[in-house]
Amino acid sequence: MKKILSLALALILALSVMSFVAAEGKEEITLNVMLPDFNSDKDWVTFEDGNPILQAIYEATGVKLNITWVADAAYGEKTSLTVADPANMPEVMVMQGVRDAIMISTARAGAFWDLTDYIYDAEEYPNLAEGAKSTYDNIAIDGRLYGIYRARAYARAGIYYRNDYAEAAGITEVPTNVEEFKELCFAIAEKGDAYVINMCKYVAGTIGITPVMHGAPYQYGVTEDGTIYPAFEDEKFQEGLDFLRDLYAAGGIDPNFMTIESGVWNDAERSNPPKAIMRLDCLDNGYRYQEWLETNMGADPEAPIVTLLTALPDDEGNIQIWPQNIGASGEVCVCKTVSEEKLPAVLKFLDWLNSAEGQTTLTCGVEGKNYWIHSDGYRYAYPEGEKENQETYTNYNSTTVHSLNQLGMNVGGDKTPPTATTLLRSWYNQNLIDNAKDVISNPCFTLDSATNVLLGTTINTAVEDAQVQYIAGKIDLEGLQAVYADWHAQGGDKILAEYQEAYDAIH
C-alpha cells in the first residue's frame, strides 16, 4: 500500500512539473542519453519515480532526460557497439576518448553533428562559447568540433599515500625526488602491512605516471634531430616499468590487480585496515580519501594522514608530470539521431548545463534535498547539525544524483556553490596552478595518422597488455621487446612515418 501511495505521489509531482513547464511556454523535448555509470551497484531513481534532480531539470528547461546507464568498466565496449549502428544511436552520448580511433572514425562517418559554428556563437550559446579555445582545439577532428569537452584540471595527476603507514615503515620525510619515492615504496613493501600501490584493471594512470616521472616522454618522443619515436622505447620508460616490476616482485602490488574493476578501485584503500596505501592517479581522489577517513575512521582534518605528492625531480633534476588529460576528459556529442530542427533546442540545453544553475542542478542536485548551504556559506551534502546522519543523505544522493556529473562539461569553470576548504583541498588547488607548467604533452596529439585511426587502438592495447604482463613477471624483457617489434610490424612503422610527415610539414 505504501509503495502504491508513493508511486501515486510521484506521478502527481511529475504531472505538476509538466503543467508548470507547459505554462511557462518552454519547448518540451525528451532526450535519449547514454552515460558511463560509476554507481552501477546502486539503484537509480527515474523521473517517473520522483527523481528531484531530473524534475528540476525539466522544470527549468523543458527537457526530460531518458538515460541509458552503462557501467564504466564496460563503457568502451558498449560505445563500439553503439556507434556501429548509427540509426539506433542515442541522441546525446559521452565519448570517453576525444581523439581515439572510435571517436575520429565515427565523426568522419557523419554520425555526430558538427558543432563548430554553434559552439562559438556567444550570443546564442554564451556558456559553451566560454570554453577554452586551446582545449576545443585539442578535441578538434580535421579542424572541426564534434562535441563539447568535459573540462578537467590539467595538472591533477600524481601520487597520494598514507603517511602513517610510511612512518611505520621508517620513512618520516615526504619524498623530494623520484629515488626517495622509490625508497619509500620498497620500505613499505618490506614492512608488509599492506600492498603499496593500489592498482586495478585501469592501468593507464600507473603506467603513465611512473615512466613520465622517471623522465620518459608521453606516448611519443622527438629526438634532437626531429625524429619521432614511441615512448615505450625510451630508456627512461623502461626504468619506470622495471621499478613497477621490482615492486610487484617484492609483494608491493596485489597479484590479482587485473581482476579488480575500476568501479571498486577505492575498496582496497577504504577498508580497515587498508589493503593498499598508495595510488598513482588523480590527486583529487587523495583529498577525498582523507575526507572519507575523517568521516569513517575519525581521522584528524588538521593533521591529514594522506599525503599528496607530485612534481618530483628525476635523477637529472627534471620535473615531468603525466598529462592525465588534455584539459578534457572525453566529450559530450550530439548524434545525428537528433533532427536538424531539434538540434538548436538540444544545444540550448547543453548550454544551460554549463551555466551556474545547470552545473549546480546536475552535479549537486536540488538545495534542501541533495545539498544544503550552512551558516558558514559552504555547501554540504547534509543539513546543518546532522553530520552524524551524513551517510543517510549520501545513500540518497547515490540514487538520485547517481553519476549525472558524467553529463557535466563545465567548460567555463566550476560554477557550483563552494564546499568547505580543507588543508588537502587547498594544497590540491594550489598544485593545479603551480605545476601546470610541468605537465608534458604528446607531440603527435594533434597530428594526423590514418593508420593510427585504423589500427592504433588495437596495436597499442597489445603493447599495454604486454607491459602489464612484464610488470607481473609473466614475460621477460625479451618477450616485451618482441611485442614492441610486432607493434612496428603491425602498423607502428606506418604510424611513425605518417606522424613524421605531418610533424616535418609543421616544423
Image: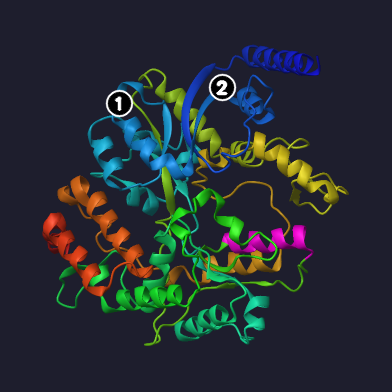
Residue 294 in the magenta stretch? The answer is: yes
Q: Which residue is under mark 2?
A: 64
Q: How does the figure colour the protein chain or chains?
A: rainbow
Residue 61 in the magenta stretch? The answer is: no
Tell me if mark 2 has few (under 14), some (14-19) or many (20+) residues whose alpha carbon lies within 10 angstroms of its own.
some
Estimate the x, y position of residue 464 in percent, counting from the top left: 31, 60
**Can you tell which quarter of the image residue 49 is in?**
top right
- Mark 2 lies on a secondary structure that is strand
**Can you tell which quarter of the image residue 361 is in?**
top right
Along the line of sight, the residue nearer the viewer: 382 or 120: 382
Q: Is residue 325 left or right of residue 225?
A: right
The image shows residue 172, relative to residue 377, as above or below, that is below
Estimate the x, y position of residue 160 in percent, counting from the top left: 57, 69
Q: Is residue 354 left or right of residue 295?
A: left
Query: What's the mark number on residue 322?
Result: none
The image shows residue 84, relative to residue 298, as above or below, that is above
Number of disc labels:
2
Name the magenta segment's main secondary structure.
helix
**Which part of the image, by quadrant, shows the N terminus?**
top right
Residue found farthest to the right: 385
Image: magenta residue range? 284-298
Q: Residue at x 37, y 54 (%)?
A: 134
Say which amino acid is labelled 1. Asp
Q: Which residue is under mark 1?
A: 85
Q: Is residue 420 left or right of residue 207?
A: right
Estimate the x, y position of residue 287 in percent, counting from the top left: 64, 63
- Mark 1 lies on a secondary structure that is loop
Label 2–label 1 contact, CB within 8 A = no
Say which amino acid is labelled 2. Lys
Residue 498: tell me if it is visible.
no
